[in-house]
Amino acid sequence: MNGSNLQFFLARAEQARSEAEAATLAHVRERCRRSEAAWQALADRAERSERMRELEALRKAEAGLTS
């Protein structure tokens, strides 16, 4: 995963949020809210993975400097 995936997930979550706010039917609004939650969970996971990769790269770089 990369930053573009994160941005994609965040954009889909925002789209679902907007659709939920515009929905007049309760079941459509709930479906959009579930979709928003799923996209946000994917975005959160992608962000954590990205942060872990950055930390691991930093750790490896620091280890290479001290060897």
Image (spheres, rainbow, N blue to C red):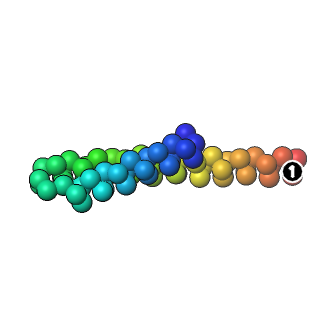
Relative placement, left or right, of 63 versus 11 is: right
| Residue at horizontal 33 percent and vertical 47 percent from the top | 38
| Residue at horizontal 26 percent and vertical 53 percent from the top | 19
Pinpoint residue 56: horizontal percent, then vertical percent.
67, 48
Mark 1 residue element: helix
Looking at this view, is 29 or 63 the one in front? Answer: 29
Relative placement, left or right, of 5 versus 64 is: left
Pinpoint residue 21: horizontal percent, then vertical percent.
24, 60
| Residue at horizontal 57 percent and vertical 47 percent from the top | 3
Looking at this view, is 22 or 11 the one in front? Answer: 22
How many marks do you count on the picture? Answer: 1
Pinpoint residue 49: horizontal percent, then vertical percent.
54, 46
Image quadrant occupied by the N terminus: top right
Q: Is residue 46 visible?
A: no
Three-letter amino acid code of the residue under disc 1: Leu
Looking at this view, is 38 or 54 the one in front? Answer: 38
Q: Is residue 1 visible?
A: yes
Q: Which residue is mark 1?
A: 65
- Residue sitting farthest toward the bottom: 21
Pinpoint residue 6: horizontal percent, then vertical percent.
50, 47
